Image (tube, coloured by chain):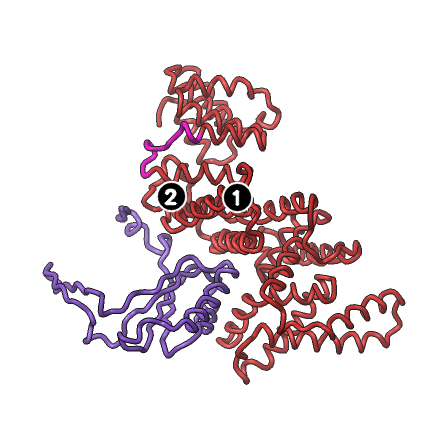
Chain colours: A red, B purple
Amino acid sequence: MTEATRAIEAVWRIESARLIAGLARMCGDVGTAEDLAQDALVVAIEKWPETGVPDNPGAWLMATAKNRAIDRMRREKTYDRKREEIAHDTGALFAIERSDFDAAADEEIGDDLLALIFTCCHPLLSREARVALTLRLLGGLTTGEIARAFLSSESTVAQRLVRAKRTLRDARVPFEVPRGAELDERLGSVLEVIYLVFNEGYAASSGEDWIRRDLCEEALRLGRILAELAPAEPEAHGLVALMEIQASRLAARSGPGGEPVLLLDQDRSRWDPLLIVRGRRELERAEELPGPLGPYGLQAAIAACHAAALRAEETDWVRIAALYDALSQVQPSPIVELNRAVALGMAFGPEAGLELLDQIKDEKELANYHLLPSVRGDLLEKAGRSEEAASEFTKAAALATNDREKELLLRRAEGDG
Amino acid sequence: MRFMMFMYPQIEDEDWNPTPEAVAEMGRYNEELQRAGMLLSLDGLRPPGEGVSVSFDGEGKATVTDGPFTETKEVVGGYWLIQARSKEEAVEWANRVPGEACRVEVRQIFEMEDFPQDVQDAYEGP
């Protein structure tokens, strides 16, 4: 890739989402909008190396895309096509000819972008399709980059994208920001998609693959954009806060060999103070809005508690236990209960944690989950019941799928470590 | 990846206070960065005349000098700390900085993982 092409690509990544969003508003279909935007990119790659990047590249790309759209539709109209398709495209053509992108206010562009986010995360699409479409249309990632990030093949991702765009078109999904009761549900899907992208980057313990960190940063970027566009939504701020604080630990969460380092064992001097401050500020925004914190906000508050402790021993476990209590009420799940048991054990002694574990020990969701016996073993050990603890660690080791974790649990079963 | 964009205004100390127009234009630029989800932090600095420089001779001796710093050709006027997906993208954002005669220097931030293990191990943070 030449220097000029790389510069064009950089402009493209900055402008493409807004461009696609504006075009989708005019023609009502994100697939067509993406094609038109791509057409404009091709023209830019042809022309810009000679003319230089124009002063307002966004407006240039939009004007070019509009001209292409008009050419294309005029040409295609002469072919033998179904009448309704022609009617549909003529409507779009009319809208495009009349629209004036240059005069669009920031607010309008913001609405278009928000509509694009909601459309990419539409519940009609599978979770994988939502993630892929979001990364493609909002993040400007190539199919190859998405494939590498999710360890699947390029053709699988390409097919997934084509199918997703067809589904949206066939269902005539309106290009708009949902209102009223629908908004809550649809926002939930958007937040979920962004957090999935983040976790895909965060979950991999090995730092070798640069694209992993990129995914975390991309999710953060999308979350921040969403929180700017929907400032009255506490959970948008809650999610950003959670991601900022979790991302602050990126440099501390794996050891020299790539092995995962647990939160309480991390070298806290490696936590990124800037991201912690940013996360806390975002959490305050969520708290200032009316109503109690939602699941993301509460998880962010827990993460902020950990971040506030310069040393692991200084952790305010009483507060964390209370936050888990609140979380288990708004989003009850056996995993939350398991975490609450850990917090209770740390705050009020091992018996308090063990008591809660007894209540959830038969949960199906935890049946093969190694952390249940592992947490139990930990609490038993703290209570001085080392024989019972050893048997729990053995159980946990048998269930653990990660070799390093298995090894660690076996050592603990032998009363070591 | 993260980049620091240092802005070096080509102005004298007495012109250091910006006009409302310049501030408004800069505000729009900063907002654009923020809306793009790229802005991590930014600040503008008070004039170098109010600054102090502490220099070391390499043998542990420090000399304190009050500003302005006549011996240096240019001084930092402010900075942006941004997240970008490539160096080219950071440069493109630098290209969009509005206003006066100035120089914007784009520098990538070292992340802890960029250092070899022994250097990482030697680090004891705050």
Nearer-the-camera pick, A416 or B67: B67
Mark 1: few/some/many CA within 10 Å (<14, 14-19, 20+): some
Q: Amino acid at mark 2?
A: Gly
Q: Decide if residue A47 is on the left or right side of residue A202.
A: right
The x and y percentages for residue A222 are 55, 54
Report the magenta residues as a range.
A310-320
Q: Residue at x 72, y 67 (%)?
A: A26
Distance in Å between CA atoms under marks 2 and 1: 39 Å
**Residue at numbered disc 1:** A289
**Residue at numbered disc 2:** A255
Vertical position of residue A97 compared to residue A197: above or below: below
Nearer-the-camera pick, A104 or A16: A104
Q: Amino acid at mark 1?
A: Leu
**Where is residue B58, by image quadrant?**
bottom left
> Do labels 2 and 1 touch, CB within 8 Å?
no
Magenta-drawn stretch, dominant element (helix, strand or loop): helix
